[in-house]
Image (cartoon, helix red, strand yellow):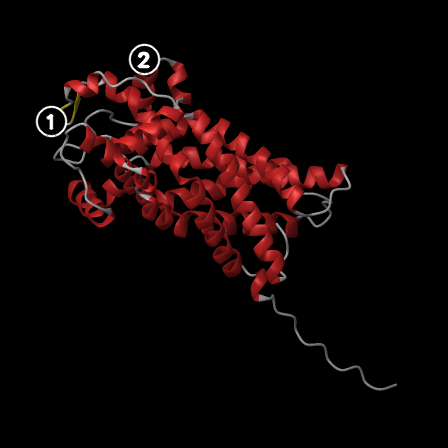
Amino acid sequence: MPPVPPQKAEFPKFVDSLWCVYIVSVAAAFNAEFVTYPLDLVKTRLQIQGEQSKNGKLGQVKYSKDLEKTPYRGMIKTALGITREEGIRKLWQGVHAAFFRHLIYSGTRIITYKALKDAFIKRHPEQTYFPLWQSALCGVSAGAFAQYLASPTDLLKVQLQMEGKRRLLGLPPRVNGIADAFQKVWSAGGIRGLWKGSVPNVQRAALVNLGDLTTYDTAKRVIMRHTDLPDNYVLHILASSCAGFVAASMGTPADVIKTRVMNQPLDEKGRGLLYTSSVDCLRKTIKQESLGALYKGFIPIWMRMAPWSLTFWLTYEEVVKLMGAKSW
């Protein structure tokens, strides 16, 4: 018999590598962020409204009489108000900071989750499916790690989102663009200032990714196991719809606290003038506005997370399929 030629060592294809997963994740996040960004802006404005009405000043600058008379607006009135008072382009104010965030956050969370999941599966090859508790652990870890790295970009985004409202109230601009925002945050608090609000931010991301990554992964596998539905866009829509709702439900309270801590002014030593910590912000928010304030902005958060998750996962799955890579 002729000798069997030696087999060449197989190397992982680029399309199945973590670098490719990272690139596709960032591209999918850019697409989802641009489509749903106005809802994020509306959500941020809603979360700050109650805080503004309860606090008589912002740093050393007192609010005008118009601020005290500002009515509580719902999601639609807030969106229409921004469009009418500031212009429709302001619905995307700060979107470039959101893009910078996803360069770090989205790629990192996906490759971290995938790496942890692959490690679990390799250690337990006898498993016929990925257990929920392992998926939850991977989702929480990936979200917390990615958000901690990306926290400075979230801080800049929140401050940029509030500038239009400050100008309408007759307050001096706090920042003029992302570069100016970065310089002022650095001058006020140094490197620690860039991570202001990182604790509630990381808590929120851990909960959101527990809802998003874990729910999407689990829902997709459960649907495939119990139905004849193939791995196509219909399955992706169903799984991402579940993921968006669970992520919004779990992440909204931490998102409210994160937004308020990040938006507060600082003293000359870089300390917050309204809240000393995320726990202090939680206590004051509940005391002044009731427990329901922790779900302020839930509707736009849910309405954003559902299409964000849908757009992200559809984009991600379709791109990797076109590239010949493994599906999620």
Classify residue 281 as left or right of residue 120: left
Q: Amino acid at mark 1?
A: Gln
User: Which residue is at 30% across, 39% downward?
Assistant: 90
User: Which residue is at 42% across, 47% downward?
Assistant: 105
What crowding class fits label 2: few (fewer than 14 Cα within 10 Å), some (14-19), or many (20 or more)? few
The image shows residue 18, relative to residue 92, as above or below, that is below
Q: Is residue 116 visible?
A: no
**Residue 275 image point, x, y percent:** 25, 25
The image shows residue 305, relative to residue 289, as above or below, that is below
User: Which residue is at 56% across, 37% downward?
Assistant: 136
Q: Are marks 2 and 1 in contact (CB under 8 Å)?
A: no
The image shows residue 211, relative to residue 180, as above or below, that is above
**Residue 64 image point, x, y percent:** 14, 21
Q: Amino acid at mark 2?
A: Lys
Q: Disc 1 marks which residue?
A: 60
- Which of the 4 image quadrants contains residue 36? top left
**Residue 225 image point, x, y percent:** 75, 40
Which disc, if any, is residue 287? Answer: 2
User: Which residue is at 57% across, 47% downward?
Assistant: 314
The image shows residue 303, relative to residue 6, as above or below, that is above
What crowding class fits label 1: few (fewer than 14 Cα within 10 Å), some (14-19), or many (20 or more)? few
Q: Secondary structure at mark 1?
A: loop
3D distance between C-alphas at marks 2 and 1: 23 Å
Q: Nearer the viewer, mark 2 or mark 1?
A: 1
Which disc, if any, is residue 286? Answer: none
Answer with mark 2 or mark 1, whichever residue precedes in sequence. Answer: 1
- Which of the 4 image quadrants contains residue 297? top left
